[in-house]
Amino acid sequence: DIVMTQSPGSLAVSLGARATITCKSSQSLLYSSNKKNYLAWYQLKQGQPPKLLIYWAYTRESGCPDRFIGGGSGTDFTLTINNLQAEDVALYYCQQYYNTPRTFGQGTNLEI
Amino acid sequence: EEQLVESGGGLVQPGGSLRLSCAASGFIFSSHWMYWIRQAPGKGLEWISRINNDGNSTKYADSVKGRFTISRDNSKNTLYLQMNSLRVEDSGIYYCARVGAQLVWDTWGQGTLVTVSS
C-alpha cells in the first residue's frame, strides 16, 4: 500500500495569513503516460461530509475558492491556503488515487 | 442536484449485523464506481470497500474483508454495505462516495453513524 505522510498534524494560523500543509507519498503518484499526479485534497468540517477541494494535485474543484492552491509532483505535495478565513477551520486530508487501496494522510487540523 | 443519502446506521452489539444503504439521485448511478469510507471516532478517513459500476467487481480493506459485503442495485439507484460480525473498532461515521469523471470522490453522502457497543 502507498503510505501518505502528512504534516503538520495540527496548525494554528492567524486570520488573513497563509497556511501550508505538506503531504509525502511512499512512491511516486505521477503516472508517466498522462503526466498527471493522482493526488487529491479533501476538507472535513465538523458535522459535514468530506468535500473535494483539489485533484490531479493542483486542479481546483468547482466552487473551491482560489485561495486554495495545490502544488507538487511525484512524491511531495503541498496545500497552501492564502488569506485564511474563519470558514477554513477544518481537517484537511491528502489522498492518493494512483492505486488501490486509496490511502489518506493522517490529516491536519487547521485552527485560527 | 447530485445527491447521496445514507441510512441504516445505529447501535449494535459486538458480533451483530447492520445493513447500510446509500440512495443516489440526480445522476446516472449505473455509470459510476462507488465506495464506502468511514471515519472512526478521533481517527482519520479509511477506505472500506468499492464496487464497479455494474457490480461484478468488488474490493475490501483488510480490516473488513470476510465480514462486510458491498453490493448495488442499479435499478433502484442504491448502494449497500452488509456488515456482519461487527466489532467495537467498526464504530464510526460511514460515508458513501461516488467516483467522478476525474477519478476522485466528488460526491459524498452526509454519513450514517454506526456504534458497536455492548
Image: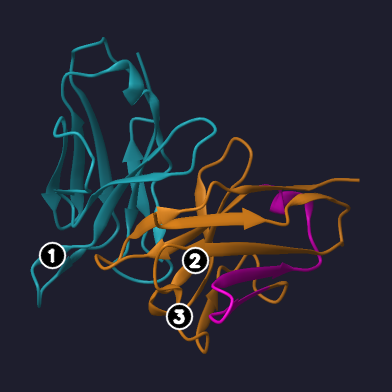
Chain colours: A cyan, B orange
- From the image, tell me which residue sits under label 3: B52
Which residue is disc 2 drawn over? B35
Q: Quadrant of the rendered structure where residue A110 is? A: top left
Q: Give the structural element (helix, strand or loop) at label 3.
A: loop
State the separation of the CA atoms marked 2 and 3: 9 Å
Q: Foreground: B114 or A103?
A: B114
Nearer to the camera, B8 or A94: B8
**Disc 3: which chain?**
B
Closer to us: B78 or A54 = B78
| Position of residue A90 measured from the top left corner of the image (x, y, whole percent) | 40, 28
The crowd level at tag 1 (other Cα within 10 Å; few <14, some 14-19, many 20+) is: some
Query: What amino acid type is highlighted by mark number 1?
Result: Lys
Q: Is residue A109 visible?
A: no
Q: State the residue at coordinates (18%, 57%).
A: A56
Image coordinates for residue B101, horizontal then vertical, percent: 26, 68
Task: State the CA–CA distance, disc 3 to disc 1.
Answer: 23 Å
Residue drawn at point x = 58 percent, y = 71 percent? B78
Q: Range of the magenta residues? A: B69-92
- Under tag 2, what secondary structure? strand
Q: Are marks 2 and 3 on the same chain?
A: yes
Q: Could you tell me if residue B57 is visible in this image?
A: yes
